[in-house]
Amino acid sequence: MNTPLREKSYFDQRATREMAQHLQAVERSTQQTMAYACRILAMTEQEAGLAGQISVRSERPGAYWTLKFGLGFDEAKPEDFIEVDRDLNTLSGDGMANPATRFHLWVYDARPDVHSIIHTHSPWASALAAARQPLVIAQMDMTPLHNDCAFLGDWPGVPIADQEGVIISEALGNKRAIILAHHGYLTAGTSCEEATYLSVYLERAARMQIRAQAFGPLTPVDDKLASEAHDYLLKRSIVKATFDYWARQTHGAQ
């Protein structure tokens, strides 16, 4: 008996329906989600002292939640997050924001679709940044970043003033990630889970690119297939289920 060949769209639609039914995301508060995100970043070795930042847009206009300055990703707990206004004055919680989160304001202003930002000086993405190399999408696990990872070729300095926010937000454009030369990277997600997902995969992609270059020039994935994989791997159900899996791995942020 010969099995008829069906269009790929059939399997995509079926998988989407079944994932919506079976991959039920865990409900968490904003602060709980952020704490798990920090632990995931630490678990994937993305901490660099106090240089890393995470923020989530607040329901209060012009404000966002962030980890209070002085704590590392690996020790973040839900009560360690503070809400700050446009001038980084603390509105909720106790403590101060990392002064370098000021550039997040410019991204939020430019991108109403962005609800969470992660910035780290992770080892492999920072290696690409030090070499001033943009990301090359050469393998399936890299495709969530296909046509979605910008590149800023010049370092504007420590981003504690307004001008750096202008430069970074303009370079990011409508993409969800950016490699910052001489610096690190940034991901901008529609949710904290998505920003975290992109962060983990960006660091993994940078590591893969650097290792693969030892064998010669990289061949990018076919554009049509990469676009298809990008959309599939960024389905909300996949992002949420992956985040929940990583959260279970951390055994922390309770």
Image (cartoon, helix red, strand yellow):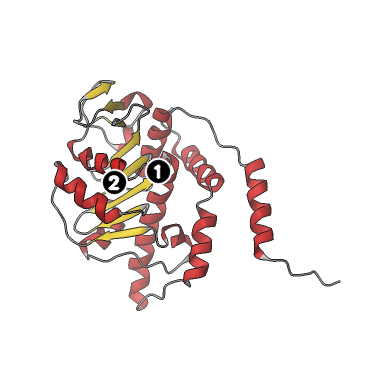
Mark 1, other Cα within 10 Å: few <14 / some 14–19 / many ≥20:
few
Q: Which mark is residue 113?
A: 1
Which label lies toward us, 1 or 2? 1
The residue at 35%/61% (across/down) is: 207
Q: Which residue is mark 2?
A: 119
Question: What is the crowding at mark 2: few (fewer than 14 residues within 10 Å), some, or many (at least 20)?
Answer: many
Q: Toward which corner of the image does residue 108 lie, by quadrant?
A: top left
- Where residue 16 appears, as percent x and y from the top left, is 63, 50
Q: Quadrant location of the C terminus?
A: top left
In the figure, 127 relative to 80: above or below?
A: below
Circle 2: element type: strand
**Can residue 123 be seen from the camera position used here?**
no
- Which amino acid does the dot numbered 2 rest on? His
Residue at the location (38% across, 75% down)?
218
Residue type (three-letter) at the residue carrying disc 1: Asp
Q: Nearer the viewer, residue 6 or 133?
A: 6
The answer to whether 229 is drawn above or below residue 69 in the figure is: below
The tag earlier along the polypeptide, 1 or 2, is 1
Q: Quadrant of the N terminus?
A: bottom right
Label 1's element?
A: loop
Q: Residue at x 60, y 37 (%)?
A: 24
Q: Are marks 1 and 2 in contact (CB under 8 Å)?
A: no
- For the residue pair 148 and 118, the one nearer the viewer reads as 148
- Tell me where residue 25 appears, x and y as whole percent: 56, 37
Does residue 17 appear in this view? Answer: yes
* In this picture, residue 16 sits left or right of residue 30: right
Residue at position x 48%, y 29% in the image: 28
Q: Residue furthest bottom?
A: 216
CA separation, marks 1 and 2? 17 Å
Residue lying at the far right in this picture: please name it: 1
**Percent coordinates x, y for residue 148 in the rendering:** 39, 58
